[in-house]
Amino acid sequence: MEAEIRLSIEVLARDGRLLFFSNVQHWLDESGGPQAPLTLVLGIVRNLAAYEKRPLFLTSTRRPSLTATESEHLMLIQVSGLKDEHLATIVRNWHFSIYDRELSPEDAKRIAPKLYGHPVAAQLVAGLLGDHTVDFLGSVSAGDRRIAT
């Protein structure tokens, strides 16, 4: 498997393509350090001249904690989630758009912290507020699929 991953990355490098890995939080240990297969990918990329000046894109819901060697050819850019007040506004706007009725600012402010900055979750929750109350959604944990954060 490692040989196939290495060959795939080398072919992409030869073709001048960028590498983009989504949701690498699953490849991080409890402290945010990389574990397999991310350690393998970082090692391969670090040793390929084609990727020395080309970015490697990683997305994660958790901030990676990389050593100097692991991050030698990487530039970390963190895009934080939206602030709660912005999410509350998005929830209210989507709710009005979907149901043609207002959601109180207080209700939107109560649900916004449960969305952890995710604007897509705001849209989903706005749709759920037609069938559920803010109290019901507020009692659902962030990891629950009903909120889908």
Image (cartoon, rainbow, N blue to C red):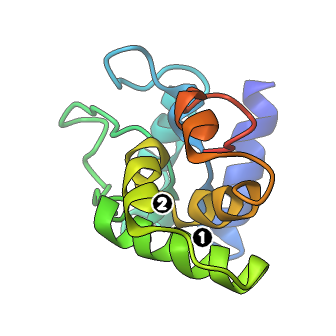
- Asked which quadrant contains residue 34, the reply is top left
* Residue position for label 1: 18
Task: Please name the residue shown 43% across and 75% down the image.
Answer: 89
* Residue position for label 2: 56
Question: Viewed as shown, does residue 110 lie left or right of 135?
Answer: left
Task: Please name the residue shown 75% across and 38% down the image.
Answer: 146
- Residue 13 lies, in percent from the top left, at 63, 65
Q: In the rendered structure, which amino acid carries the disc numbered 1?
A: Leu
Q: Which quadrant: the N terminus?
A: top right
For label 2, the SS is: strand
Whether residue 49 is visible to the viewer of this picture, yes or no, is: no
**How many numbered discs?**
2
Q: Spot the residue most to the left.
A: 68
The image shows residue 3, relative to residue 10, as above or below, that is above
Between the C-alphas of marks 1 and 2, the distance is: 7 Å
Q: Residues within 10 Å of mark 1 (few under 14, many from 20)?
A: few
